[in-house]
């Protein structure tokens, strides 16, 4: 067991070092920007996986928390002219409040109804951003946010550090007794409830933690783009994150983060194919989901550890 842990740590150090040094060695500002987006998507994917991957309650409205964090940063920066660093804790708090308000009534739903309820909540928020355009900026959104760090490279390292912290914290929680209970709920919710476990408490708690990191990623994205707009609440945002989780390996936390990085890089690499880019991207996803339904990255790493261990 100790050897497996050492392999995990060694693999994590190698991946993080490669991601940190890539912009320096290649010397491309474009690559730095792409990797920044990769890291932010990694935060969103890992946060989704903590709740939905462990409990099995798939959240189709994760964009609700992402957009809540981003718009919190937008309002603080453009309406209240607050120090941009205050937007990070504020975005976490607002996203958690959204999770409590939406989670209490929806997590009691069974079957696909929770996923549909969360999807509806995100769609409603997107519509509200358009209805109250005088405050939210409507389709154009809020512009003129102040960057957290003016150096593109330093900001990328900061976001990469946030990704590492997110994966580390969520992985520790997933391997703790809390994570064990979440997996037990996924296995047999009725038995857990009959055993006296307050499953509502654990599901709400996991949703709050998931929302907190999603909101943080939303604020980081807002300060990278220097603007926020209603598409952050769109269904496609949630679906994109879910696909990244499935490719990385659901329930592993770090797998979805790497899946997000892989698919974001793949999207950029295919830009040279023009109108065929989406065709190729979709074909790759279909092949991955069809031949390796359990995910690509996390299962491959487990097989590697079995081979050397």
Image: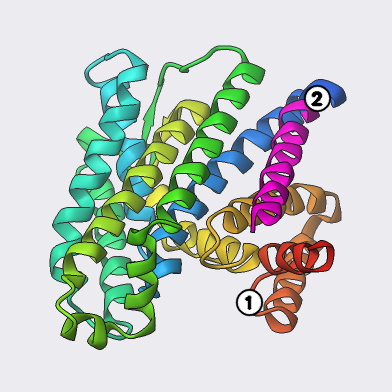
Kindly identify the residue that appears in the image at 73 percent across and 50 percent down.
7
Please state the extent of the stretch shown in magenta in the rendering: 1-22
User: Up-down: is 174 above or below 299?
Assistant: above
Query: Camera-side residue: 288 or 4?
Result: 4
Q: Which mark is residue 190?
A: none
Measure how far apart labels 1 and 2 are at the Cα level.
35 Å
Lower sequence index among marks 1 and 2: 2
- Indicate the quadrant containing the C terminus: top left, top right, bottom left or bottom right: bottom right
Query: Camera-side residue: 165 or 19?
Result: 165
Q: Which mark is residue 294?
A: 1
User: Up-down: is 106 above or below 189?
Assistant: above
Q: Which mark is residue 28?
A: 2
Q: Is mark 2 on a helix, strand or loop?
A: loop
In this image, 73 relative to 110: left or right? right
> Is the residue marked by circle 1 packed among few (<14), some (14-19), or many (20+) residues within 10 Å?
some
One can see residue 58 in this view: no
Q: Quick check: is 36 in the magenta stretch?
A: no
């Amino acid at each position: 067991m100790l050897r497996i842990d050492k392999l995990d740590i060694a693999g994590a150090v190698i991946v993080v070092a490669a991601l940190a040094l890539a912009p320096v060695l290649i010397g491309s500002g474009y690559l730095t920007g792409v990797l920044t987006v990769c890291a932010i998507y990694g935060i969103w994917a890992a946060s989704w996986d903590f709740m939905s991957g462990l409990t099995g309650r798939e959240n189709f409205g994760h964009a609700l928390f992402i957009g809540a964090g981003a718009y919190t940063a937008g309002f603080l920066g453009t309406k209240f002219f607050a120090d941009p660093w205050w937007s990070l804790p504020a975005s976490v708090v607002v996203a958690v409040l959204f999770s409590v308000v939406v989670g209490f009534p929806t997590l009691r739903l069974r079957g696909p109804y929770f996923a549909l309820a969360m999807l509806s909540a995100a769609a409603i928020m997107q519509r509200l951003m358009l209805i109250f355009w005088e405050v939210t900026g409507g389709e154009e959104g809020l512009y003129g946010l102040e960057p957290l760090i003016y150096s593109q490279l330093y900001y990328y390292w900061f976001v990469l550090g946030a990704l590492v912290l997110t994966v580390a914290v969520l992985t520790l929680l997933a391997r703790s007794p809390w994570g064990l209970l979440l997996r037990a709920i996924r296995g047999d919710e009725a038995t857990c409830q009959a055993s006296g476990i307050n499953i509502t408490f654990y599901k709400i708690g996991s949703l709050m933690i998931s929302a907190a990191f999603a909101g943080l990623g939303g604020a980081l994205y807002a300060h990278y783009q220097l603007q926020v707009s209603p598409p952050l609440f769109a269904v496609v945002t949630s679906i994109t994150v879910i696909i990244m989780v499935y490719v990385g390996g659901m329930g592993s936390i770090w797998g979805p983060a790497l899946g997000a990085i892989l698919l974001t890089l793949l999207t950029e690499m295919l830009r040279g194919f023009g109108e065929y880019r989406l065709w190729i991207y979709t074909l790759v996803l279909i092949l991955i989901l069809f031949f390796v339904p359990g995910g690509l990255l996390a299962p491959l790493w487990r097989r590697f550890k079995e081979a050397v261990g």
